[in-house]
Image (cartoon, rainbow, N blue to C red):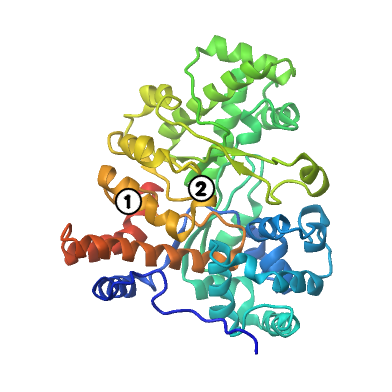
Amino acid sequence: MPAPLELDADRLLPVEPALRSVARDLYSSIADLPIISPHGHVDPAMLRDDLPFSDPAELFITKDHYVTRLLHAAGVDLASLGAGSAAGADPRSVWRLFAENWQLLAGTASGYWLTHELVTLFGIDVEPSAETADATYDAIAARLSDPAYRPRALFERFGIEVLATTDDPMDDLAVHAALAADDTFRGRVLPTFRPDAYLDPTAAGFADRVERLTASNGTATDDFRGYLAALEARRAHFIAHGAVSADHGVIEPYTVDLTDDEASALYRRAVAGELDAAGAREFRGNMLLRMAGMSARDGLVMTIHPGVYRNHSSATFEGFGPDTGHDIPLTTSYTQNLRPLLEKHGLERGLHVVLFTVDETVYSREIAPLAGFYPSVFIGVPWWFLDAPDAVLRFRASVTETAGFYRGSGFIDDTRAFLSIPARHDMARRLDSAFLARLVGEGRIPLAQAERIAVDLVTTVPRKAFKL
């Protein structure tokens, strides 16, 4: 007999009966509140075009590096999973491989989210396995032909109030404009300014990107002031299309305050391809500081996602491209690295800086203390390798005693996997309810206060941090 696939109604809530009862009531008060998703990677064209999803493999596996990396670690070839440049593999064969290896996901956040999606969205009641692979594939594929499973219908079903995408600075944002003008679509989909490849001289195609950027604003490529003006113009374009944030995926959150002459000299060498590694670091650090200055002036929330060694496996990058599961966390430090930025802009009223990390040692040591003093600094919730049940509870314990509940970003799903958005937010709401229930049980906060905080973590906190 196939093993059943079930969802415990009290999953992630405390085991102790009295605390579980408190957590259950807290969770029930927030379970159906709208989803605010101010940072993610869903393709907005999916919502504009509203086409049916193609097949279960593409929906759940081929584009989800959380899943493919674990299967790869167990010896499954990425090509056979249709990952990256290998897209086009037979979807039923991909699904069979996934189903045969379902047990590898046990205990992981990916396994938790996938179970939630399979049960709540598709009514799957048996575990994926070699025995059930074809039947579950067919059951999901049948649902995908139903108009109720098209992107816009699911967007409404999920209760998404705000969904932010991640976009290149030179994007014309025509898709966002089309969605905003479409009276048949009631959602709010916001672009996010992501300038990394235009600020890092070591990024592939940096000089060509900068040439396009400066040309768009009618300035010479080697003119530093023109380069800054072009960045500001593109930020204004994003703001005009509803953007509320600018995201920075840097290797390290290093900042340095340089004079215009010093920065201009580095910039000219950068576009000429003449900067060494040390010079490139100084240029990146100065531009991260200047981006904070722009955010203080134009109001875009500055989110910083540092500390990831991208494309750790050269062979995998060459064979399958980026975002195929081989990005690995690095040690990250904020206190010294961010001081020049905060010295110059940290007390400015218009600036919001949200600090994320995949190095959880910095939560209590650096991020919470910074957010506990600087009005401009907010704590980014667990991201990427840390957006998992136990890590989320460790996060709450690490930051709350120093900074409280109101210096955070609100939950961030940070995903390309559209169907996982409600599963991820539901996980966060259950875990916050569990944490609050413990504080109530220990007599540290009254129940009435916990009830208010539970709602605020889903509504007030993200709206404040992202100026929604």
Q: Is residue 143 above or below residue 429?
A: below
Question: What percent of the width, then of the height, locates residue 243?
Answer: 51, 47
Residue named by callout 1: 397
Q: Using the image, tell me which numbered label, if any, was put on residue 243.
A: 2
Q: Is residue 207 above or below residue 146?
A: above
Q: Quadrant of residue 36?
A: bottom left
Question: What percent of the width, then of the height, locates residue 423?
Answer: 50, 68
Question: What percent of the width, then of the height, locates residue 112?
Answer: 53, 68
Q: Is residue 66 above or below residue 16?
A: above
The quadrant of the image that shows the N terminus is bottom right
Q: Would you say the residues marked 1 and 2 are in contact, meaning their CB atoms lie under 8 Å apart?
A: no
Label 1 crowd bin: few (<14), some (14–19), many (20+), radius 10 Å? some
Residue 126 shown left or right of residue 95 in the figure: left
Q: Amino acid at mark 2?
A: Ala
Q: Quadrant of residue 336?
A: top left
Q: Amino acid at mark 1?
A: Ala
Residue 350 visible (yes or no)? no
Q: Secondary structure at mark 2?
A: loop
Name the residue rendered at 57%, 57% in the picture: 415
